[in-house]
Image: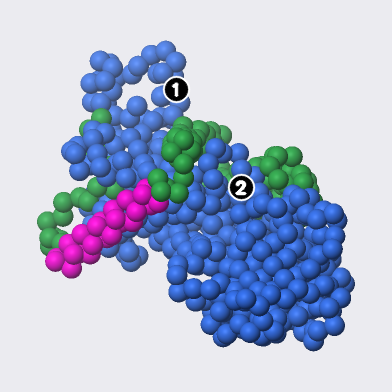
Chain colours: A green, B blue
């Protein structure tokens, strides 16, 4: 696991770069102090305005948000990316990027709109016809169709272009491309 | 495991991208925080606070911006988490006590951010499937969030400074995982150390071999594709919902929780008469009482209609982010205040007929009371005010949240200090 112990985000030692100046140290210290103070203030406000019995619910939602992202959304995205790259090993990178983008775009919109569809029968919306008045299910389906059509069209153009480029390369000969 | 790590690597996962997306997300958080605080203090002013009443659409603008920036946070936050996701598997998990604190603060930051935008989104369509009060928790979490943001920037400042500007070469040790680790060198020895042979067998082995054989993503294309996806996603979630407040986008408002023009008399309703338990029986024999010191005067609707009428065009702008321009007609509040001898500096308490509700009683500072656009409205869009919009009379003032535009108004009393 050696390679993982040097995460790419850790500041790497750089001999050619001077040690952080006093301005940097002051800026960091003030940001950290102000940040910690605001954070503590927020927690205090929470305890001050929300009944103690309700606080475990808040902790549950904050914790569940992490779990849902780290254990569901991120792995699904990861395996979707692997599958797509596997399935598209013969496709140009641009085509894969377009398809990936289309799927991610549709998924994010779905993530935002599906709760609205659920809420049409939950909460206060059923008592108030001016809340959630649209047909969100149909609109979401249309949205998916539109991005599918656009992504397919873009992929077709990019695919044709990459095939033409390949044709030119093979016409020049194998030495042209390492 | 290493192969899985390598598969997690992506050209889009690098500190420069984290800085680029982080800046946008940080800006969105700050906009949400600033507009949120403004809305909070309008509803719960500290003693002596006064607010601007112009431009008339001020609150429509700030609260619309609050929700729009909040919507933009969904793709931006997911993108930011995608970029830094491999850091979750940093090894060793904890290097020191300070490192533990740092990781704990990141966890809190991530959890609070995700929870905050989620409950905010659900609040825009009045769905509360959680066991805590929304307003208080949203406010407290905002402080936790903004504190965590400052803390995070402070901790990462050297990296942020280094990657702030686009450069051809950021120096060694800054590439993404695939480049940082020569595959041939590590893969063999790591596999040997971990499994005693170069390859594990069985299901795990097959899965790893499968992942290992996956072609890596092309770098430049992958990075540009990532940025383009984030940009299009932000444009889509904002563009297809912002029409609920931003009129030019009304035609493409297909996912907004409200639609302009949908509601009685062409105006959406935040709380219906039924929800507020205001019935015909409750408003029977209605009189509006205006009180100051010992003076108290009551007006029937007919008496109010005989007073000088003013017409104004003001938006009703809700804390939930929607807004709707409308034409209102009624009596200037300052005329009523003058009738009971209230001075220029008098604040008023507005009381609704609704039996209960957190905004049954609200306060109005003198800057709104004396404003020529502030009305006790009797008509909306050329018709007698609908019961859903507060018949027999409601408040309408420039630049205030909808919850403070008291409906079913029954009593206006001066607050004596």
Quadrant for the N terminus of chain B in the image: top left
Left/right placement of residue A26 relative to residue B236 reads left
Residue B386, percent across and down? 84, 64
Q: Chain of mark 2?
A: B
- B225 or B387, nearer to the observer: B387
- Count neighbours of disc 2 (C-alpha within 10 A) and say few if under 14, some if 14 to 19, many if 20 or more: many
Residue B339, percent across and down? 69, 84
State which region is magenta: A21-45
B46 w.r.t. B208: above or below: below
- B56 or A164, nearer to the observer: B56
Q: Residue at x 74, y 39 (%)?
A: A121
Q: Nearer the viewer, mark 2 or mark 1?
A: 2
Q: Quadrant of residue B243?
A: bottom right
Left/right placement of residue B185 relative to residue B299 reads left
Label at residue B207: 1
Q: Is residue B359 visible?
A: yes
Mark with earlier residue (2, 1):
2
Residue highlighted by disc 2: B122
| Secondary structure character of the magenta stretch overall | helix
Q: How many marks?
A: 2
Residue B318, percent across and down? 65, 63
**Secondary structure under the numbered disc 1 in the rendered image:** helix
**Secondary structure under the numbered disc 2 in the rendered image:** helix
Residue A137, percent across and down? 75, 44
B218 w.r.t. B190: above or below: below
B253 w.r.t. A102: above or below: below
């Amino acid at each position: 696991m050696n390679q993982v112990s040097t995460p790419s985000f850790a500041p790497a030692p750089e001999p050619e770069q001077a040690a952080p100046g006093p301005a940097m140290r002051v800026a960091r210290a003030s940001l950290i102090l102000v940040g910690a103070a605001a954070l503590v203030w927020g927690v205090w406000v929470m305890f001050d305005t929300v009944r103690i019995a309700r606080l475990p619910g808040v902790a549950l939602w904050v914790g569940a948000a992490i779990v849902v992202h780290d254990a569901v959304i991120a792995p699904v995205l990861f395996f979707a990316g692997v599958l797509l790259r596997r399935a598209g090993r013969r496709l140009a990178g641009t085509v894969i990027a377009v398809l990936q983008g289309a799927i991610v775009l549709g998924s994010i919109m779905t993530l935002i709109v599906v709760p609205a569809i659920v809420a049409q029968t939950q909460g206060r919306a059923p008592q108030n016809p001016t809340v959630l008045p649209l047909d969100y299910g149909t609109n979401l389906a249309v949205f998916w169709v539109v991005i599918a059509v656009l992504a397919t069209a873009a992929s077709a153009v990019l695919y044709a272009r990459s095939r033409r480029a390949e044709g030119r390369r093979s016409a020049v000969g194998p030495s042209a491309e390492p | 495991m290493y192969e899985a790590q390598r598969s997690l690597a992506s050209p889009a996962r690098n500190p420069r991208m984290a800085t680029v997306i982080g800046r946008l997300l940080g800006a969105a958080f700050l906009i949400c925080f600033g507009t949120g605080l403004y809305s909070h203090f309008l509803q719960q002013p500290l003693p002596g606070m006064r607010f601007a009443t112009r431009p008339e659409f001020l609150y429509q603008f700030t609260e619309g911006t609050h929700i729009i920036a909040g919507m933009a946070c969904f793709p931006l936050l997911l993108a930011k988490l995608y970029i830094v996701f491999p850091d979750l598997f940093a090894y060793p998990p904890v290097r020191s006590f300070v490192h533990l604190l740092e990781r704990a603060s990141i966890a809190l930051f991530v959890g609070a951010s995700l929870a905050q935008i989620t409950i905010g989104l659900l609040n825009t369509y009045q769905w509360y499937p959680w066991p805590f009060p929304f307003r208080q928790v949203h406010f407290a979490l905002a402080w936790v969030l903004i504190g965590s943001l400052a803390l995070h920037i402070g901790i990462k400042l050297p990296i942020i400074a280094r990657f702030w500007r686009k450069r051809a070469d950021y120096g060694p040790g800054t590439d993404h995982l695939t480049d940082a680790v020569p595959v041939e060198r590590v893969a063999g020895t790591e596999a040997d150390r971990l499994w005693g042979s170069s390859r594990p067998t069985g299901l795990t082995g097959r899965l790893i071999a499968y992942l290992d054989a996956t072609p890596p993503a092309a770098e430049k294309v992958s990075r540009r594709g990532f940025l383009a996806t984030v940009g299009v996603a932000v444009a889509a979630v904002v563009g297809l919902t912002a029409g609920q407040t931003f009129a030019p986008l009304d035609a493409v408002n297909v996912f907004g929780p409200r639609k302009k023009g949908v509601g009685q008399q062409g105006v959406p309703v935040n709380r219906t008469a039924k929800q507020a338990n205001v019935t015909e029986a409750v408003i029977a024999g209605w009189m509006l009482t205006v009180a100051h010191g010992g003076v108290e005067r009551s007006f029937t609707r007919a008496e109010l209609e005989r007073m000088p009428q003013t017409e104004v065009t003001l938006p009703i702008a809700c804390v939930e982010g929607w807004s709707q321009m409308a034409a209102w007609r009624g009596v200037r509040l300052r005329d009523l205040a003058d009738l009971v001898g209230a001075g220029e500096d008098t604040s008023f308490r507005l009381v609704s007929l609704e039996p209960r509700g957190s905004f049954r009683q609200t306060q109005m500072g003198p800057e709104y009371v004396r404003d020529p656009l502030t009305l006790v409205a009797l008509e909306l869009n050329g018709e007698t005010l609908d019961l859903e919009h507060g018949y027999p009379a409601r408040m309408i003032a420039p630049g205030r949240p909808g919850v403070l535009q008291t409906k079913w108004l029954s009593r206006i009393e001066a607050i004596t200090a």
